[in-house]
Amino acid sequence: MLRWTITFIIIAIIAGILGFGGIAGAAAGIAKILFFIFIVLFIVSLIMGRRKS
């Protein structure tokens, strides 16, 4: 999931440089959402991993 976040950030940067503001904004928004989902899943997996020990 972090790989997808980085991909969308790169797309947003390239689109922003080339002047495609709408695409850059959409890609940045998707990247932000994916990043927060990644963080939540990472924290949940850390908590669940500690419970089993």
Image (cartoon, rainbow, N blue to C red):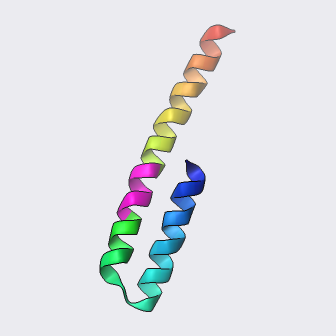
Membership of 33 in magenta stretch: yes
Q: Is residue 23 left or right of residue 6?
A: left
Q: Is residue 23 left or right of residue 11?
A: left
* Image spot of residue 13 (x, y percent): 49, 77
Q: Image quadrant of residue 26?
A: bottom left
Membership of 6 in magenta stretch: no
**Picture layout, residue 30 above or below residue 47:** below
Residue in the image at 63% along x and 16% along y: 50
Residue in the image at 33% along x and 82% along y: 21
* Image spot of residue 1 (x, y percent): 55, 47
* Image spot of residue 7 (x, y percent): 55, 64
Residue in the image at 46% along x and 36% along y: 40
Image quadrant for the C terminus? top right
Residue in the image at 63% along x and 19% along y: 49
Magenta residue span: 29-34
Q: Is residue 22 left or right of residue 11?
A: left
